[in-house]
Amino acid sequence: LDGAPSRHSAAMGFGQLVIGPPGSGKTTYCNGIQHFFQLTGRPCAVINLDPANHDPPYECAVSVEELITLEEAQREFNLGPNGAMVYCIEYVSKNLDWLKERVTPLVAEGKYVLFDLPGQVELFNMHDALREVVAAITGPEWNLRLCTVHLIDSHLCADPAKYIAALMLSLSSMLHLETPHVNVLSKVDLMDKYGELDFNLEYYADVMNLEYLADRILDGNQDAIGTAPSPGQTMMRKKYGKLTRGLCELVEDFGLVNFTTLSIEDKASVERVVQLTDKSIGYFNAGGFSAAAGPGMENAVGGTDYDERALVSNMMVGSNYERHHEVQERFFSDRDEQVVPP
């Protein structure tokens, strides 16, 4: 129809928002993914939106420190590190034009964009400033599709209480940011060094029946050093037993949270994460929609058709069980002692 907007008036951009608690490996992930994309021929740019990350190991295309630094906010407003971090992200949300001027040319060049975000959990868990930034970036003016990659340190699986807390953080972040999410258990190659797991890796990655994990907590089986719980610990577990079971039921009722595993130095592991993120945002092969509807694809009436061959997913063949079993065989010891609940 005359006057109808074109489906492809501008090149579609793709990228990832990398979030996670401090120490979960966000900067290492960005560095590793950038290196992986360089080796596989995918143009990539990393945007550092963490004011506390002064000297990242990756090649940084844009840094928030060009706009504001953590030290400036602390000095100007007499804030501590946490308050200054919140102020910096609020400042970014009020200066989105600055960010757009720097990101838009990168998208126009066809670069896949990685946003390295701060590790302060309230920013992506409950505070409005980061959500406003994400809403603007994924809005129609930016023409950018983003997937959130939420990194959780895999050693938390060795402590049932911490694992349930990580599930709640993942769930609340998914609901707060409202973007496609890929939850990742990072540093899986180091997971075995933090103690034995109560169940197989599959149980934690697929978030199976959490009633068994609640039983472990309430029975006191999570003590890492194998000692009997103190009377105070026993009382606390009994007092908050109903709350523990309620949190487990809440996660299961939503049915949104599961994990893939990652060892950033393992090629197959990185490929699996990349394939999941590509699928979640519709990044088809190399170039997204621009490759699927590129030159030569014009139809007889002047429109543009998709090349269906460019829309085929490259997702790995194999069940989740097979993939988790392969990871556990490679990185874990004492595997015969770990069980999956019936």
Image (cartoon, rainbow, N blue to C red):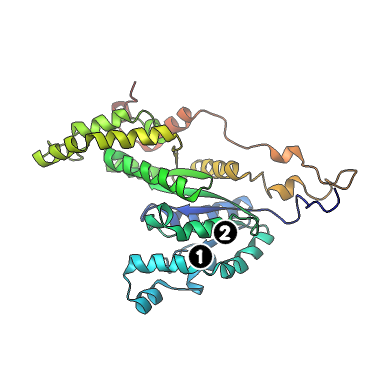
**Residue ID at (53%, 29%):** 318
On screen, residue 113 versus residue 232, left or right, reads: right
- Depth check: give the residue in front, 41 or 140: 140
**Residue ID at (64%, 52%):** 41
Asked which secondary structure carries label 2, the reply is: helix
Q: Position of residue 74 (x, y in %)?
A: 35, 74
Q: Position of residue 148 (x, y in %)?
A: 51, 49
Residue 196 position by quadrant = top left
Asked which secondary structure carries label 1, the reply is: helix
Q: Residue flagged by tag 2: what amino acid is it?
A: Ala
Q: Which mark is residue 93?
A: 1
On screen, residue 338 versus residue 233, left or right, reads: right
**Residue ID at (44%, 32%):** 324
Residue 280 position by quadrant = top right
Q: Earlier in the sequence, mark 1 or mark 2?
A: 1
Q: Which mark is residue 136?
A: 2
Asked whether disc 1 touches disc 2, contact meaning CB atoms under 8 Å apart, the reply is: yes
| Residue furthest right as drawn | 300
Q: Position of residue 177 (x, y in %)?
A: 48, 50
Q: Residue flagged by tag 1: what amino acid is it?
A: Ser
Whether residue 159 can be seen here: no
Report, in whole angstroms, how far the alpha carbon at label 1 lies from the one at label 2: 9 Å
| Residue furthest left as drawn | 231
Task: Decide: few, some or many residues near mark 1? Use Cα within 10 Å; few <14, some 14-19, many ≥20.
Answer: many
Residue 35 position by quadrant = bottom right
**Residue ID at (35%, 36%):** 332
From this view, report whether residue 97 is shown above or below residue 116: below
